[in-house]
Image (spheres, rainbow, N blue to C red):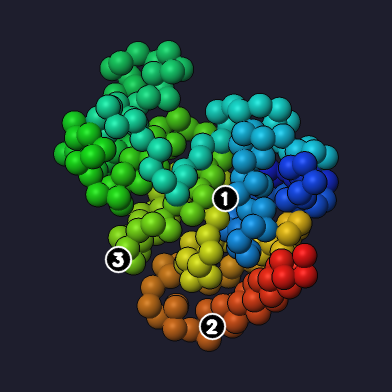
Amino acid sequence: MSESMISIQGVSKHFGEFQALQNVDLEIKQGEFTVLLGASGCGKSTLLNLITGFIRPTEGRIVVNGREVTRVEPHCGMVFQQYALFPWLTVLENVAFGLKMKGIGKSQRNETARRFIDMVGLQGFEDKFPNALSGGMRQRVSIARVLANDPDVILLDEPFAALDAMTRQVLQDELLRIYEQSGKTIVFITHSIDEALLLSTRMLIMSARPGRIVTDLHNDLPMPRNAAVQLSPRYNELKSQIWETVQAEVMRSLEATTSR
């Protein structure tokens, strides 16, 4: 896990007079599970959109797996908070959609799609339509579709935020299992410190706007991160450290808002 998969070099992003990011420098290694934390509006989603090529930086450059990002390309797969599925396609057809766009034959793409449907625990639901699935199941389909396309990097923008606590816990466990099986590089946005501690190998805390990386923490908690780990002194130490930094940035954000 020594090679750099994502290289963010002096990146700033302006939307008119509004500055979302300021001079972000960041290297993410191949196989890392990196979680971005920070106050609302600090530029977390903007950073993900820059990595995947949905938008371009105002200054600086982004390189993914040795290729500079200049447009939307299949080097990154994105899982959004809302379930971005085609309602008129079945689970199998949704997961296979990207492969179809690549011109892969029906038999091969369906075989690949079924493998990832099995991986996310949706065996038996291949012929169901999204409206017949729960929110958690729809998000599993979204993850399977990204995995089927075999991207270099998987980006997840608060994918479990809209789910109930029990479903969220199940999908966190599923995502960790998939991460361990696939070895993919993952960048994950959350507002939950506990979620960050449970999932990540590395945690990045962003400043109040304009967004910068203010804290870079290695998550040395052992796997599996069961109840015993979550009650350990080290877990509470990391949680307190993160909370103090995030709280300070949230206060800075609020002060900047009220002073305008």
Name the residue that disc number 2 marks.
236
Specify whether residue 67 is in view. no
Say which quarter of the image contains residue 56: top right
Q: Element type at marker 2? A: helix
Q: Are marks 1 and 2 in contact (CB under 8 Å)?
A: no
The residue type indicated by label 2 comes to Asn
Q: CA distance from mark 3 to mark 1?
A: 23 Å
Q: Nearer the viewer, residue 253 or 137?
A: 253
Labels 3 and 2: the sequence-earlier one? 3
Furthest toward the left, the residue is: 124
The residue type indicated by label 3 comes to Met
Assess disc 3: are there few (<14), some (14-19) or many (≥20) residues with their C-alpha within 10 Å of its C-alpha: few
- Identify the residue at image location x=39%, y=73%: 226
Q: Element type at marker 1? A: strand
Name the residue that disc number 1 marks.
187
Question: Does 214 appear above or below 140?
Answer: below
Name the residue that disc number 3 marks.
166
Q: CA distance from mark 3 to mark 2?
A: 22 Å
Nearest to viewer (mark 3 / mark 2): 3
Question: Does 220 appear above or below 8?
Answer: below
- Identify the residue at image location x=33%, y=40%: 141
Q: Is residue 65 left or right of residue 103?
A: right
Q: How many marks?
A: 3
- Identify the residue at image location x=18%, y=31%: 127
Labels 3 and 1: the sequence-earlier one? 3
